[in-house]
Amino acid sequence: MKVKKIAHLIALIGVAGTAYAQSTPPAQPVARVEITGSSIKRIAKEGALPVEIISRKQIDAQGIVTAEQLIATLSVNGTGSDNLASNADVTSGAQRGNNGASSANLRGQGSDSTLILLNGRRIATHGMKGQAVDLNSIPMAAVDRVEVLKDGASSTYGTDAIGGVINFILRKDYHGLEAQLFNDITQQGGANITRGSVTGGWGDLDNDGYNVLAALSHAESQKLRGDERDFVQTFQPNRGVSVDTRGTPYATIFATSLAPTLLSKGSAGATLPGGTQAFNGVNVLDLPGQAGCKSVPGMDAYDEKLWDSPAAAYGCAWDTGRAAVLQQPVTSDNAVLRGTWKRGEHQLFAEAVGSQTVVAKSFSPNQISPSASTFNATSFYPSTGAAYNDIYNALVKVFPSVAANYGLPIAYRWRCMECGNREIKTKTRAVRYLVGADGPLQLGGKTWDYRVGLSQAWSQSVSTLGTGYNYTADLAKALGSGIINPFLAPGQTQSQAAMDLIKSTSAEGVELYGGKSIMTELDATLSGELFNLPAGAVMGAVGMDFRREEYRFNGDTRDVSQRRAILNAPFDDVNALNNVSRNVKALFFEVAIPVFKSLEVTLSGREDRYDGFGNTFNPKASFRWNPVESVIFRGSYSSAFRAPAFNQLYNGVTESPYAGKDLADPATCASGKVDSNIVGCASVTPVIFTGGKQNLGPETAKMGTIGMVWEPFTGFSANADLWLIRRYDQIKSITLTDLVKNYNLFQDRFLHQNGQLVAIDQRWVNAGTSVTEGVEVGARYNFKALDARWTAGIDGTRLLEKKSKPLESADYGKSEVGVFTFTGDLGLKWKHVAYLNYQNGPWSALLQNIYRSGYEDQVLPGVASGKVVPSDYSSKVKAYSIYNVSLTYSGVQNLTVTGGIKNIFNTDPPFAITYDSNTGAGSTWEPRVADPRGRSLAITVNYKFL
């Protein structure tokens, strides 16, 4: 969509805000308040920064009960692997340890570059990684409003505020008692969401001098399995996607160098009579005259052309995407207790916020593969097994050379369905205690506003193995007995003896790992009028922020003598940290100068001193110019920084085998593209090293915004803000794509032995520069018609540029706007939320449209090399657009009922050539873009007892 199209859209629709706008309230006495992004108390509309405010009423009307749901509706939020659906499967590299966490990602700068505040102050990062705040810890039932600052704010808040700031503000001075019940039921089943909450407040600050607020909530989100949605279907070779795994419920036979086997006495595999192509990974079901791969549910033929693997022509595959959980089951409990005491004009408060969240990710059962360290020759299927002769007879008909190997064991790759789906359950408890005070202070004959607080926050997470994990040695011994049959024909089941044997190897209940993040903070701010100029008073603020950050991470908690190996359990013992900490000391200032009656300039800056890498100063300058009553121009320029997280500094080296088929060794393949017909361009699967480096420094950023707000007449306003963010010395794990593309710059990260690529180093580094540029537009039109008040609106983001370079000396790569990426932020060109709100007496209604543009899709190796052209292939993923509607009635005293339909037209996520290998992404759909739940009915009942 061109920029001029956006301008035309604004002119036609005239709208603004992510959630629907409210009708204009009655005039109230003007009070100065502190707005997110500023330390100066001021009249809200005086600010120069783009701040979006979302009210409690707007949240309820949309049927939103979690912070993750709210963030997903913001067009300014990026499209990264930050939600639970994007981390529901096997994950590797930087995504490891995200169990149970969901995060925000403003302007696509990443979850660790988006600052989350609760009542204007920091909270602890997620205990597992210690890198970003977990949105599940936000007590949404007690939230009064949410303020979203669409600008950098390191000059006010320090680290992390590169993409922007989201401030969740809880209810204050509330008195009464109310209960709320919410239920969101999907039409197709699965993924139902429920929440119950009770909020009570006693005392009136003005009349009684005190107020006590208490809120409790319990919420549950049920799981949604891949096989509960038809759009999850990875066997679609006609469209350019198929499953790349031969770990199947009916085992696939392999030749191996571990020992002579039935298929071959060597590791190459078997050949057809008179042929030269060796076939390895043969599934008997796929041989001529056999039942076929489809005879077993979830299986189909392996597409050797799409994956450019000729040796796999007689293989079967199994759709792991349909076994994965698309929406993880979540149970959360949140509590808030806040007491406020008013003494004259001063307020003292004490606050405790706590949460407990349990998330259970579940994905495909383990596969057993030949390996010297796990399943050696003693675990192979013996000639005494019940299915041995059937396998031999089927093989020898096609590969006569197998006859010479009769009696040798069978090496195989098998999906252990009887072991159950792999499950990792993560429990996270988070708490923040806060005491503070604010009010006026007389100093030097002037009145100042002070604000002071002392807080401690912590988040502790523990991940425990559920079903699907087995002790490796025990399982290997059991398999070698021949009692367990990995070659069950359609309709057959394991014997009771086999099931008992499998169950005896289970490792369910073993603690995988755990972590705890702790933050202790003392902050104080003093603001007020400094002096007067002809255009008005110069306002200023100074403040200090002292905090201590701590982090610890444990791996396997079992006694060393009892640490039996568990198959594919992602223990992170190498990353264990007993306790690391650092102190941060900061001073900051802000001055708002009325240059003219129509022009205000604000200057601010913050000096942070970190243990470990010294100090950093980040200034900011912003302006607000109101040349005529109907037009406001605004803009800012600032610098920002992000300190490395503890795990980025101190993690050990984790080794993860690369599971894809799209990687070629750039040392021998100039194109970097897999093509089995070109010598040196065969698919390789090296080990990937990830981990921390203690010499990491902070990354820095420079950013600017320029925009305007136009209000030509009462009831209509439009806004547009152009923004640009440049980041330097980024703390990043350089992507494999960039490493391969720039092999000449990163040769030292490719480890070769005897001419073979064996490993690639992807550990954290300070490297490269990125540029992200966009424009945020919106408008709103309030009008009366048909005896009702209406509001129409839209809030959209157009991504103009997204590019990066791995080193400062390198050239920028191609634009990443509208192009598929495996992990991280998917740079969609255009996103918007549009709405139409109706209000008439006790009735109100909302119609909402959420839109995400399409993008260039992933290309599998066979298509990339030109070896195959799928008949229904499209290189572009279609746009995703859904409509929601709700109706609210408040005509009964103390009772408010809201009913709504989400995804009115039951729109499925658009088809994408995505396969859930080791990226945590979905299969044939993109969880970073779409909601898999489909049409649902949401009902909210709110009753006020007092």
Image: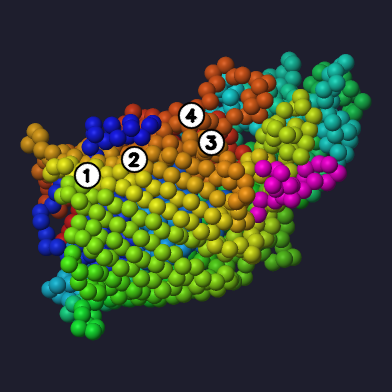
Marks 1 & 4, CB-CB < 8 Å contact: no
Q: Earlier in the sequence, mark 2 or mark 4?
A: 2
Can you tell which mark lies on residue 877? 4
Crowdedness near tag 3: few (<14), some (14–19) or many (≥20) residues, C-alpha within 10 Å = many
Cα separation between marks 1 and 4: 35 Å
Q: Is residue 758 magenta?
A: yes
User: CB of mark 4 within 8 Å of CB of mark 3?
Assistant: yes
Q: Which mark is residue 126?
A: none
Within-10-Å neighbours for mark 4: few <14, some 14–19, many 20+: many
Which span is picked out in magenta? 742-763
Which residue is identified by label 2?
796
Q: Amino acid at mark 1?
A: Trp
Tag nearer the camera, 2 or 4: 2
Whole-Å distance between the Cαs marked 2 and 4? 20 Å
Question: Left of 259 or right of it: where is 175?
Answer: left
Q: Residue beneath label 3, please?
A: 820
Q: Residue furthest bottom?
A: 444
Circle 3 sits in a helix, a strand or a loop, which is it? loop
Label for residue 710?
1
Q: Residue at x 62, y 39 (%)?
A: 917
Q: Would you place residue 262 above or below residue 43 in this image?
A: above
